[in-house]
């Protein structure tokens, strides 16, 4: 087309016909490209595609529509088509063996590859946005996988662009990358390790979105909100965000609370220190008083029957505390707690439940409560645990038991007053 135009100008007696013809052709290419740009972006996209996507209607598919409009997929596809049309125009308008044609072809092909890459990025972002609402997103590190695909696509397009600019085959560049393997491993160490770690986390079901993760080494104690190619973001209980290298979750140890949440029960493992000097055999009056307890009555009756039978067979002098078996206030209190927990509405009946003694220390005799609540919600769990121990501390004096604690300022003042008080 340029040659015909130059010939016509030359026949018309116009000087510099070739240059003028080239400028006219370039102007036509620019004009057609501008018109196509306006048609694509002002008519097709705004008035047809985007209007139909934003049209109010059924809620079905609204997630897809929002994702398509948020990530500029159609906008980048329009630029990609403009590059294709520009390439076609260059072949139509400009003659072969033309330096201008070769330069424009290279520019248009680079344009096509760049916007093809950006369109792929947008498509992956759309898929990630939509899949984030599905169950698959919690089971697979989709963000890390898509970031890996973006990285691979970027490397491939970069090689193709460089090979196009220098006029060499991409295979030559790829063969030369072997010598740069060490450098590439150093540059892309974190993405490669992150990709491998993400695959291991997914394959072994070690971590998913929403899991509560505890990793003191990195100060992480909260819910996983993002699993990326190189980092994992954890929203801590105080609403701060901790970023952990993805590969650290494979190389280091961490605690995942997911199994606790899925089990339906959360463990209570707390003890109270009983003053050992308050432990004693129960008198008949104390037994009679505790028999009025609905929870303790069956235990005391059965235990007394068992002890009476044993003592009768032993044929020993029961007036001495050294002979025979007797009820203790600590053992009765432990039995009471066992029954109390089994009847508590907030305790899981299908999981381990026990009240046990630990080794005595200088702080007293630890009596440990080991049970599971029937909820895993933190607030409800703490409420149930606090209610239980409120009751334990309040009911302890009924068994003539005392809690052991370090003397406080009040204790010291009482002791000082007693020591300085005049003797009667």
Image (cartoon, grey):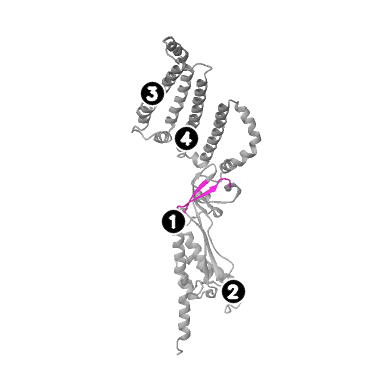
- The residue stretch that appears in magenta: 232-247
Residue nearest the observer in this picture, 289 or 79: 79
Q: Main secondary structure of the magenta part?
A: strand
SS of the residue under disc 3: helix
Residue furthest to the left in view is 56
Separation of residues labelled 2 and 1 (CA atoms): 48 Å
Mark in front: 2 vs 4: 4
> Which label belongs to residue 127?
4
Q: Which residue is mark 1?
A: 379
Mark 2 and mark 1 lie on one chain; the one further toward the N terminus is 2
Separation of residues labelled 3 and 4 (CA atoms): 32 Å
Residue furthest to the top in view is 11
Separation of residues labelled 2 and 4 (CA atoms): 77 Å
* Marks 2 and 1 close (CB-CB < 8 Å): no
Category of crowding for the residue at label 3, using alpha-carbon neighbours closer than 10 angstroms: few (below 14), some (14–19), many (at least 20): few
| Residue at image location 51% in from the left, 23% down from the top | 103
Category of crowding for the residue at label 2, using alpha-carbon neighbours closer than 10 angstroms: few (below 14), some (14–19), many (at least 20): some
Mark 2 and mark 3 lie on one chain; the one further toward the N terminus is 3
Mark 3 and mark 1 lie on one chain; the one further toward the N terminus is 3
Mark 2 and mark 4 lie on one chain; the one further toward the N terminus is 4
**From the viewer's perspective, is residue 117 above or below residue 276?**
above
Q: Which residue is mark 2?
A: 324
């Amino acid at each position: 087309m340029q040659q015909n135009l130059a010939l016509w100008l030359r026949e018309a007696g116009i000087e510099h016909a070739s240059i003028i013809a080239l400028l006219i052709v370039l102007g036509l290419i620019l004009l057609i490209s501008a018109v196509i740009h306006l048609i694509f972006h002002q008519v097709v996209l705004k008035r047809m595609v985007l209007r139909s996507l934003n049209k109010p209607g059924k809620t079905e598919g609204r997630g897809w529509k929002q994702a398509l409009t948020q990530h500029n997929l159609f906008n980048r596809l329009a630029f990609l088509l403009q590059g294709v049309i520009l390439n076609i125009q260059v072949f139509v308008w400009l003659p072969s063996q033309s330096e201008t044609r070769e330069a424009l072809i290279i520019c248009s092909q680079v344009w096509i590859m760049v916007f093809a890459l950006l369109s792929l990025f947008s498509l992956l972002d759309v898929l990630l946005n939509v899949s984030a609402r599905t169950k698959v997103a919690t089971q697979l590190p989709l963000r890390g996988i898509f970031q890996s695909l973006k990285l691979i696509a970027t490397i491939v397009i970069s090689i193709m662009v460089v090979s196009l600019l220098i006029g060499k085959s991409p295979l030559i560049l790829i063969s030369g990358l072997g010598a740069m393997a060490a450098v590439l491993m150093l540059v892309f160490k974190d993405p490669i390790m992150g990709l491998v770690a993400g695959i291991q986390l997914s394959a072994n079901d070690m971590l998913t979105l929403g899991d509560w993760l505890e990793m003191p080494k990195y100060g992480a104690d909260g819910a996983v909100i993002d699993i990326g190619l190189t980092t994992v973001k954890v929203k801590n209980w105080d609403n701060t965000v901790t970023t952990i290298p993805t590969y650290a979750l494979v190389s280091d140890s961490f605690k995942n609370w997911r199994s606790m949440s899925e089990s339906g029960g959360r463990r209570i493992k707390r003890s109270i220190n009983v003053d050992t000097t308050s432990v004693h055999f129960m008198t008949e009056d104390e037994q009679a008083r505790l028999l009025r307890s609905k929870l303790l009555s069956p235990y005391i009756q059965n235990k007394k029957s068992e002890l009476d039978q044993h003592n009768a067979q032993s044929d020993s002098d029961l007036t001495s505390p050294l002979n025979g078996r007797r009820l203790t206030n600590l053992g009765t209190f432990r039995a009471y707690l066992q029954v109390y927990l089994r009847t508590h509405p907030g305790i899981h009946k299908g999981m381990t439940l026990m009240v046990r003694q630990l080794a005595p220390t200088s702080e007293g005799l630890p009596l440990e409560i080991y049970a599971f609540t029937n909820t895993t919600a933190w607030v409800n769990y703490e409420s149930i645990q606090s209610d239980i121990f409120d009751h334990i501390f309040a009911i302890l004096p009924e068994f003539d038991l005392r809690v052991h604690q370090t003397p406080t300022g009040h204790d010291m003042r009482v002791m000082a007053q007693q020591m300085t008080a005049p003797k009667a």
